[in-house]
Amino acid sequence: MAQYAILIYAGDSAHSTDATPEDLELHNRHAEQVERSGSMVAAFALQPVDTATSIRGDVVTDGPFLEAKEVVAGFYVIEAPDLDAALAIARTNPATQQGGGVEVRPVHSGFVSSSEG
């Protein structure tokens, strides 16, 4: 089965330091639904955008590459039989109804580290 990365674009991470349980409820419920469906491979919420550090060439700066209304707030990888099935799953992400959006991209390759740091 093919794997698809779903990149979540939002104003910032739903997991900011001042997030309430209510702020996280829709996102946690969505993650649980995708996991129960058997499609979830991995999921990661990112820290707020003000914790980002960017590197371009020899220049290191605080913050993301671009000043934008929306930033990558997190991502997850799913398994789906085809793009249409991946899009159906991605459409249920709460960010799509909260002023943000998602991007679905086929995974080309990758690996999972077996080291435990």
Image: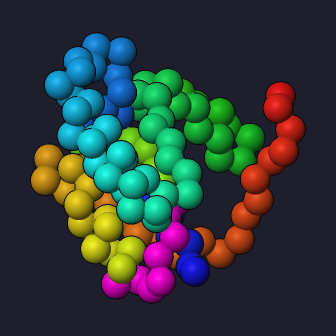
Q: Nearer the viewer, residue 90 or 7?
A: 90
Magenta highlight range? 77-84
Location of residue 54 by image quarter: top right
Q: Nearer the viewer, residue 68 or 22?
A: 22
Residue 97 seen from this side: yes
Compared to residue 78, the image places residue 36 above or below, namely above
In the shown orientation, is residue 31 left or right of residue 51? left
Percent position of residue 36, x then y? 39, 54
Where, quadrant-wise, is the N terminus in this rendering?
Answer: bottom right
Residue 68 in sight here: no
Q: Quadrant of residue 86?
A: bottom left
Identified at 47% across, 76% down, the residue is: 80
State the residue at coordinates (47%, 35%): 46
Using the image, determine if residue 53 lies above or below residue 1. Answer: above
Coordinates of residue 23 in the picture (x, y in percent) = 20, 28
Locate residue 48 relative to residue 87 in the image: left or right. right
The residue depicted at 35 percent of the width and 34 percent of the height is 13
Instruction: Give x and y (percent) for residue 103.
Output: 37, 65
Residue 63 location in percent, x, y? 48, 32
In magenta segment, residue 79 = yes
Position of residue 26 relative to residue 22, above or below, is: below
Q: Quadrant of the C terminus?
A: top right
